[in-house]
Image: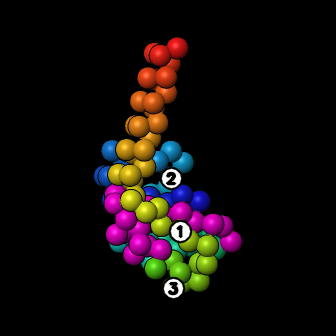
């Protein structure tokens, strides 16, 4: 399960496909929406809020919780570089 812990406005602007939005400030009140038996991947813009979300979830008994290091910003750059590489490869052929 992929959880975007950024604000609703940040999530609406752009997010990782398939992510649900539960802002870190709402996380404790919305724990019932998150199944404990699933592996969780949390992310924010650069990693700090994701780290906080990871700690909150682990403190509430979630064992398989991972923070996406570098957050959405790193994912976005990596995705853009991958797409650019594909386009350049296509042009070269």
Decide: few, some or many residues near mark 3? Use Cα within 10 Å; few <14, some 14-19, many ≥20. few
Residue 66, horizontal then vertical, whole percent = 53, 68
Q: Which residue is mark 2?
A: 19
Q: Going by the picture, which residue comes out furthest to the right? A: 37
Numbered disc 3: secondary structure:
helix
Relative depth, front residue between 50 and 87? 87
Q: Is residue 39 magenta?
A: yes
Q: Is residue 31 magenta?
A: no
In the rendered structure, find residue 59 and report the number of the disc placed on it: 3
Relative depth, front residue between 35 and 44? 44
Q: Is residue 91 above or below residue 82?
A: above
- Tell me the residue at 61%/78% (across/down): 63
Which quadrant of the figure has residue 50?
Answer: bottom left
Numbered disc 1: secondary structure:
strand
Left/right of residue 82 with respect to residue 32 in the rendered view: left
Residue 91, horizontal then vertical, whole percent = 46, 15
Q: Which residue is mark 1?
A: 66
């Amino acid at each position: 399960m992929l959880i975007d812990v950024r604000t609703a406005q940040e999530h609406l602007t752009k997010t990782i496909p398939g992510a649900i939005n539960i802002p870190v400030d709402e996380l404790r009140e919305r724990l019932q929406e998150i199944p404990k038996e699933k592996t969780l991947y949390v992310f924010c813009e650069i990693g700090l809020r994701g780290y906080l979300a990871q700690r909150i979830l682990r403190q509430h008994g979630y064992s398989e919780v991972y923070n996406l290091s570098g957050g959405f910003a790193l994912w976005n750059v990596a995705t853009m570089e991958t797409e650019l590489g594909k386009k350049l490869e296509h042009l070269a052929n």
